[in-house]
Each structure stands twice: as C-alpha cells, then as structure tokens.
Amino acid sequence: MNGNRSGIELRRDESGQGPIVTGFQGRGFRVRDDVFPEGLLLSPVRAFAWQDAPPVDALTVAHLGDLFDLDVQPEFLLVGTGAALRQPPRAFVRELEGRGIGVEVMDSRAAARAWGVLRAEERWIVAALMPLV
C-alpha cells in the first residue's frame, strides 16, 4: 500500500445487497459514484449523507433521523466512530437495546468493511459512519 488512504477502493459484488461502501475519499466514503464527505447513514435500501454527525460522546438516537424507518426492524446498528474506536454514550446504547436493536461499535473504516460482509450475508442491519478525521 502506498500510504495514500484517500484513494483506497474496496471492490465487492453489489448484486442484491443494497448500497455498499466501495472506497474512502478524504475524510468520507464512496458508495458507487457518490461521495459522502461528512458522514454516511446506511440501510439495506439506501445510503444518505449524515450532514450533522455529532461527536461520538454526544451521539443520540435523534441524530440518526429516519434511519430506522424500515418495514422490518434492523438486527443492529453498526456505528463507525471516525478514525479511531470510541464508545458512544451508554444512554444511546441502552435506548436502542430497549427497542430490540443491538449496537456494534468500531472505527469507521472497519465498520464500512463489516457493512459489506454483513450485507453479503443478507443481514438486515443499519449503519452510521462518522467522518474519517
């Protein structure tokens, strides 16, 4: 690897898996031809910009907007916490667990890769990926 992380590309067969992160660009994520520099919210049916991604320690369920508005409740939320792994507030995790939604936390690059693997397994999940800063 040449050390330039801004041009890293992930290649994966996207058939039937919904939106998949195909690479990283600067501090953001690439999903096919679209770049999401400020953060990314993913569901099995769509990818959309996370314009107001808060710092990890201030994360609330309200920050996720309509991410959970799906016909079927997701198994869990995959949280990408930016360049490094940081834990979200315990109240955030408890609220989602109270709804029957698990929470898995990792740095955003690992979360983007995990998203692709889990969607290839057809797991019904959602993700919130904070910018790579």
Image: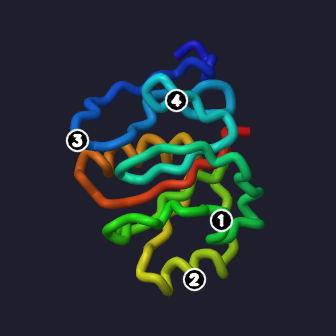
Could you say whether the residue bearing mark 2 is in a helix, strand or loop?
helix
Q: Between marks 4 and 1, how big is the CA–CA gap? A: 24 Å
Instruction: Point out the tag, 3 or 1, that comes first from the N-terminus.
Output: 3
- Residue under the image location 69 percent in, 40 percent down: 38
Task: Please identify, in this view, whether the residue under mark 3 or under mark 1 is nearer the observer.
Answer: 3
Query: x, y (%) of residue 19?
Result: 39, 40
Residue where numbered disc 1 is placed: 87
- The numbered dot on residue 94 is 2
The answer to the question of whether label 3 and label 4 lie on touching residues, with beta carbons closer than 8 A, is no
> Which quadrant of the view contains residue 109?
top right
Q: Quadrant of residue 56?
A: bottom right
Q: Secondary structure at mark 1?
A: loop
Q: At label 1, which amino acid type do we have?
A: Gln
Residue of label 4: 30
Q: Given the image, on which type of amino acid does mark 2 rest?
A: Arg
* Between discs 4 and 2, the one toward the N terminus: 4
C-alpha gap between disc 4 and disc 2: 31 Å
Question: Where does label 3 land, which residue?
Answer: 16
Q: Earlier in the sequence, mark 2 or mark 3?
A: 3
28 versus 81 height, above or below = above
Residue 62 relative to residue 98: left or right: right
**What quarter of the picture does the C terminus occupy?**
top right
Q: Amino acid at mark 4?
A: Arg
Q: Disc 3 to disc 1, how far (Cα)?
A: 32 Å
